[in-house]
Amino acid sequence: MMERSHIGRSTRRRFLLGTAGVIGAAALGTSGSPARAAARVARPTVAVLGGGVGGLSAAHELAERDFAVTVYERRALGGKARSIPVPGTGQGGRRDLPGEHGLRAVFGIYHNLPDTLRRIPFPGNANGVFGNLVDVPQVALARSGGREDLHLSVPMSEPAMVPATPEQLIANLRALMETAAHLPPTEALAFANRMFVYLTSCDERRLGQWEHTPWWDFIRAEQMSEDYRRLFGSGATRLVIASRPQETSAHTVASVAEAFFYNIQGRGSDGAPTRILNLPTNEAWIDPWETYLRGLGVRFHVGWTVRDLVMDGGRVAAAEVTDPRGDRQRITADFYVCAMPIERARAVWNDQVLAADPRLVQAATLPTEWMTGIQYYLRRPAPILPGHVLYIDSPWALVSVSQAQFWPGRNLPADYGDGTVAESLSVVISDWDTPGPVSGKPARELSAEQVAAEAWTQLKDHLNDTGRQVLTDADLVTWFLDPAVTGLGGPSPTHEEPLLIHPVGSWQRRPSARTAIPNLVLAADYVATNMNLATMEGANEAAREAVNAILDAMGSSHPRAPIRTRYRPPELDLVKEEDLARYRQGLPNRFDTG
């Protein structure tokens, strides 16, 4: 694993540009008096357009390098990662009930985001906000129709790293599939073979062949049982990345599965496979992050919406924004970090921007889907499982976690709401297009009340179907649906914060953080990164790439933001070299048989 770099305050004050400062000033087209030009070079200004994980990560790295940073965010800091207080629910001095956009998990396959979390101070934690992460010991695959749910133990510590042979790797894969999925040995072996094909594929084949192959076809789902299709086909994609397996790139799904496979073995991991925060997200992470960044001099303008980018001479001359009162203003800076999600970014990539960097034309076509959080607040604790529950047979591809058990520092009845809520059952709805069991309509065609009722029914169908009464209607106090979803029950429902998805061929449409516009960089989850998935980790990695692009443009001698790449098992290097030769000859992967 690459070593972690920490930028101290004393280092931040040594922003050494030397003669490269003159080059940077010329590149930026600095005008005015020599004194003003020198001031601009000595403390460059950056406008970060968007205050989600990508924007805050960029602000973090820039501020630690003594840039003058201002963040413009239209809704709330944290973006999709934030928690959302339920307005008006707090009584008697209690806080409002904690809602959120969706489940928050920091996986062991992440490496860049954990580094940032360690550098955000938190009282009493030697490792900062990272110390607020709690290992998740179990994951459950819940089934409906009277079938017992499968509880899987998740490794809590890292075993020793022992090099494996290709034969050992495929044996491990088969054993994992048989244990986890209770599939017939033939199907477990079939899936293990498909994964081994990917594990031994060279990078050129991954991008040239598997990126353009649907996951459904890659795993040969049509030849397998219904359980195989649900678990490894629709389950693997709808539950995790809100995308249909018939459309999703096999490269995306398999690369994530590969990372988890090594993570479970303790190879190339940064901790347990999955962890969640021990407090609501804002309390555990976003608020301390804002406090730290303000201490570094970062300024925040929340409620400001970016409307357009003004180009002049192939550079961004200004950004047009509206302030909280609706007044239109122009903001200027030396550099601009576009950290808005793709559905917002493409709205400000006007014709001049696209002409200056034609790669953004394809990036603007990247698709999104709805993936939305809903919280059910219960009268009693409901520790269904000490971890995440995946509802395999759910038409809406639900995932949940009972949060109260992971918040030891909070007593929900005493600290939140009106004193009657003892549990926050946080659920994600990943499929808004499949008809629900009650109305026979997809979620996006229903009212918010109908969505809440049908999702609740699907939860009960999975958890109560073997005779236990895990959830009862009497336990339900209220619910809260992510306010990003608007207009439900009407003719034009919309989702203001959808999730980027990864259909076949989408990798080639994803831009790099560095654009052809000298003072514009990108820091969001749609940027092409090692993560290859729309996640907090991907946004954080993109932000680091963006910051390094700015440093390079200025010729700065300041340390670059470290980028941690995925683990690559050395024992497979020779196999991949052979596959590269086969791929260039038009031959299949050696293990791609049948």
Image (cartoon, helix red, strand yellow):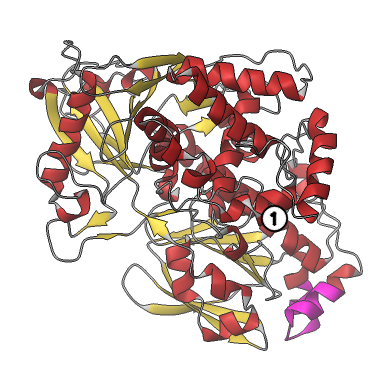
Can residue 417 be seen at all in this image of the molecule? yes
Taking the view exactly as shown, the residue that stands out farthest to the bottom is: 313
> What residue did someone put label 1 on?
545
Residue shown at 57% from the left, 50% from the top: 539
Where residue 430 sits in the image (x, y, percent)?
A: 33, 43
Image quadrant for the C terminus? Answer: top right
Which of the 4 quarters of the picture holds residue 313? bottom right
276 to 381, vertically: above or below: below
Region of the chain picked out in magenta, as a range: 23-39
Specify the quadrant of the image occupied by residue 453. top left
Q: Nearer the viewer, residue 106 or 226?
A: 226
- For the point 29% across and 18% down, the residue is 411
- Looking at this view, name the residue that lies furthest to the right: 19
Relative vertical location of residue 373 with respect to residue 108 in this rendering, above or below: below
Q: Indicate the amino acid at tag 1.
A: Glu
**Callout 1: 10 Å neighbours few (<14), some, many (20+)?**
many
**Residue 458 within the segment the image draws in magenta:** no
Q: Position of residue 444 (x, y in %)?
A: 21, 54
Furthest-front residue in this view: 594
Magenta stretch: residue 32 in it?
yes
Looking at the image, is 35 positioned above or below residue 301?
A: below
Q: Secondary structure at mark 1?
A: helix
- Look at the magenta stretch and give its main secondary structure: helix
Give the quarter of the image for residue 278: top left
588 relative position to 106: left or right: right
Q: Where is the N terminus found, in terms of image quarters?
A: top right
Q: What residue sits 70% from the left and 38% below the top?
A: 566
- Left/right placement of residue 175 relative to residue 417 reads right
Residue depicted at x 27% and y 27%: 425
* Image coordinates for residue 462, horizontal then vertical, percent: 23, 24
The reply, left or right, for residue 8 in relation to residue 270 is right
